Image (cartoon, rainbow, N blue to C red):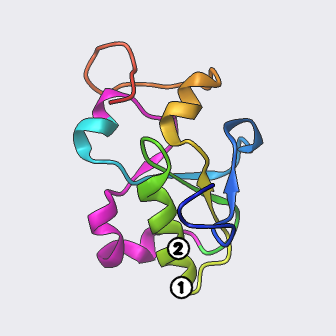
Amino acid sequence: MPVFGPQIPSVTPDQVDSDAYLLDVREPDEWTAGHAPGAHHLPMMEVPARMAEVPTDGEVVVLCRAGGRSAQVVNYLMNNGWDNVRNLDGGMKSWAAAGREMVSEDGQPARVL
């Protein structure tokens, strides 16, 4: 049972559309090690100051390593008027396990820290 309950809308990796806006809220070292191609990096602690960067239309899928931090960000955005945000169930761990594409920024094979 998720800690955040059913009020946090979520999607599985195979439900993420190719045109979804992927918002990665992990720390810079996690992002560098491996992330979804085309994702947008916005560390969780910077979200309140940079909310204007998060689209208010179209599907926004928020992700972290395992789904906890991203669920908090989805909750925060929903409480501030966003109705188009979804949590990636299982985070980047589930993304990688589902065989979804990943890229790294450090020349190493993409991996989830």
From this view, report whether residue 28 is shown above or below residue 103. below
Q: Residue 72 at what x, y percent from top left?
A: 45, 67
The magenta stretch is 32-55
* 31 relative position to 38: left or right: left
Q: In which quarter of the image is residue 69?
A: bottom left
Q: Does the magenta stretch include residue 79?
A: no
Three-letter amino acid code at the position of disc 2: Asn
Which numbered circle lies on residue 79? 1
The kind of secondary structure element at disc 1 is: helix
Report which quarter residue 73 is drawn in: bottom left
Where's residue 64, x and y in %? 44, 47
Q: Is residue 50 covered in magenta? A: yes
| CA distance for labels 2 and 1 | 6 Å
Residue 19, relative to residue 82: is it above or below? above
* Residue designated by label 2: 75
Badge 2 vs badge 1, beta-carbon distance below 8 Å: yes
